[in-house]
Image: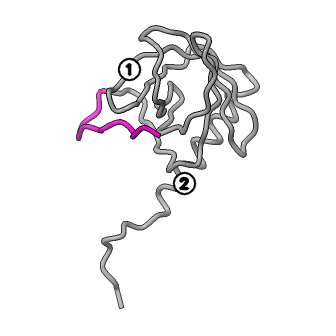
Amino acid sequence: MATAFARPAYSRRRISRVETLGDVWVYWRCEGMDDVSRVCDLSVGGLSLSTPVPPPLGAKARLDLLVQEGQIRAEAVVRHITTQGGLGLQFIAITDQDCPRLVTLLNRLRSSSTRKLPSFAPSLA
């Protein structure tokens, strides 16, 4: 499996993304190819995933997120490709029924990432 995106210290994004910590997967179809990939990070505007064979920039994809919140279906367009096997997708359509599930998923991911203490935290004992 390919590695995730390398992240710069700054971001030009208007909407912040949440790291998924490896527990979110997506079934996606694009350019005649079907695949299941690990989602690296996610926002209300799009997601990045790992894939060994990325489709071309501008290609449209149909997504089905595999999450405990329920089915989340969306259409997206490929906006970014990395040589390390990363793919950035921008959402272009999501159903009215699935949008609240996406928000619930993002809230869960944000709350689980803020509860984790860094491994280098000193002992207070």
Residue at the (34%, 86%) spot, across then down: 124
Q: Which residue is mark 1?
A: 80
Give the percent coordinates (x, y) of residue 35: 61, 27
Q: Is residue 43 left or right of residue 3?
A: right
* Residue type at the position of mark 2: Ser
Residue at the (41%, 35%) spot, across then down: 16
- Tell me the tag on residue 71: none
Q: Is residue 121 left or right of residue 52?
A: left
Q: Secondary structure at mark 2?
A: helix
* Residue type at the position of mark 1: His
Give the percent coordinates (x, y) of residue 123: 34, 84
* Residue nearest the viewer, comparing 36 with 72: 36
Q: Which residue is mark 2?
A: 111
Residue at the (38%, 26%) spot, across then down: 14
Could you give the CA–CA distance between mark 1 and mark 2, rounded to whole angstroms?
27 Å
Quadrant position of residue 119:
bottom left
Was residue 10 drawn as part of the magenta stretch in this picture? yes
Q: Residues in magenta?
A: 1-12
* Residue nearest the viewer, comparing 35 with 38: 35
Q: Is residue 3 left or right of residue 61?
A: left
Which label lies toward us, 1 or 2?
A: 1
Q: Is residue 81 above or below residue 109?
A: above
Q: Residue furthest bottom?
A: 125
Q: Are there few (<14), some (14-19), or many (20+) residues within 10 Å of tag 2?
A: few
Give the percent coordinates (x, y) of residue 99: 67, 28
- Whether tag 1 and tag 2 are in contact, CB under 8 A, the answer is no
Give the percent coordinates (x, y) of residue 88: 43, 25
